[in-house]
């Protein structure tokens, strides 16, 4: 693969939760991708319609000559590992930041269940708020792309 090319082109739109999941999963795996916003680029929207039966189904992922419409992020990573192992920096299913995120969820449940029956509802709200802030911080960290942006990346 040419150094100026990426192995993955992802067609997405703002507000799409499935697109956000794809972005997070690819970022966690260290996969460089070009992101094409179908609402900002009519050619990208036309491409998606051409491969998705006339619908603007996102995310639509192009891996070389193969196009996947609304694939699971894990399926994209697994297929990419099979086709081009060097394109994936970290193929683990449970990266450390995802584990930390779910530990924060468990912590808030335990804290809430311990403090509320003990008559410490206010303290439960404070602890819950703090853990929620940690959860959001970890989620933002997970979504940050670890590789350098490509020239074709937008959004």
Image: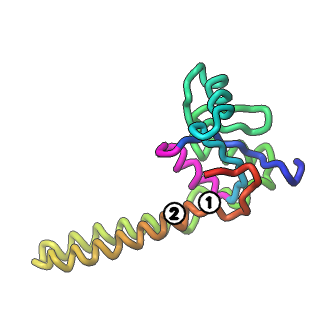
Main SS, magenta region, reads helix
**Whole-percent x, y for residue 121 in the image:** 15, 74
Q: Which residue is tagged 2? A: 98
**Along the viewing direction, whichever of 64 and 100 lies nearer the viewer:** 64
The stretch drawn in magenta includes residue 20:
yes
Please rate how many residues cluster around mark 1, counting C-alpha atoms within 10 Å: few if below 14, some from 14 to 19, many from 20: many
| Residue 34 is one of the magenta-drawn residues | no
Question: Which of the labelled discs sits on residue 28, or is there none?
Answer: 1
Give the percent coordinates (x, y) of residue 66: 74, 32
Lateral position of residue 126 relative to residue 100, left or right: left
Furthest-right residue in view? 2
Q: Nearer the viewer, residue 142 or 154?
A: 154
* Mark 2 element type: helix
Q: Which quadrant would residue 110 be assigned to in this image?
A: bottom left
- Verify CB contact (< 8 Å) between mark 1 and mark 2: yes
Q: Residue at x 55, y 60 (%)?
A: 143
Please, is residue 85 above or below residue 36 in the view? below
Reading the chain from its start, which is encountered first: label 1 or label 2?
Answer: 1
Give the image quarter of residue 46: top right
The residue located at (55%, 63%) in the rendering is 142
Dividing the picture into quadrants, the one containing residue 106 is bottom left
Residue visible at 62% across and 25% down in the picture: 49
Front-most of residues 143 and 154 = 154
Q: Which residues are magenta?
A: 14-29
Residue at horizontal 43 percent and vertical 64 percent from the top? 102
Percent x, y for residue 117?
12, 72
On screen, residue 123 above or below 55: below
- Neighbourhood count class around disc 2 (C-alpha, 10 Å): few under 14, some 14–19, many 20 upward: some
């Amino acid at each position: 693969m040419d150094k100026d090319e990426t192995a993955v082109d992802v067609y997405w739109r703002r507000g799409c939760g499935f697109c956000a999941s794809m972005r997070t999963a690819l970022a966690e795996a260290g996969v460089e991708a070009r992101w094409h916003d179908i609402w900002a680029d009519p050619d990208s929207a036309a491409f998606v319609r051409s491969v998705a039966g006339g619908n603007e189904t996102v995310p639509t992922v192009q891996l070389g000559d193969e196009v996947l419409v609304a694939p699971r992020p894990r399926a994209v990573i697994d297929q990419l590992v099979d086709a081009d192992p060097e394109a994936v920096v970290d193929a683990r299913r449970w990266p450390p930041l995802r584990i930390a995120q779910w530990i924060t969820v468990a912590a808030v449940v335990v804290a809430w269940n311990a403090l509320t029956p003990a008559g410490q509802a206010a303290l439960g709200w404070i602890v819950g708020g703090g853990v929620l802030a940690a959860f959001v911080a970890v989620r933002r960290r997970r979504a940050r792309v670890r590789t350098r942006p490509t020239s074709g990346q937008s959004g």
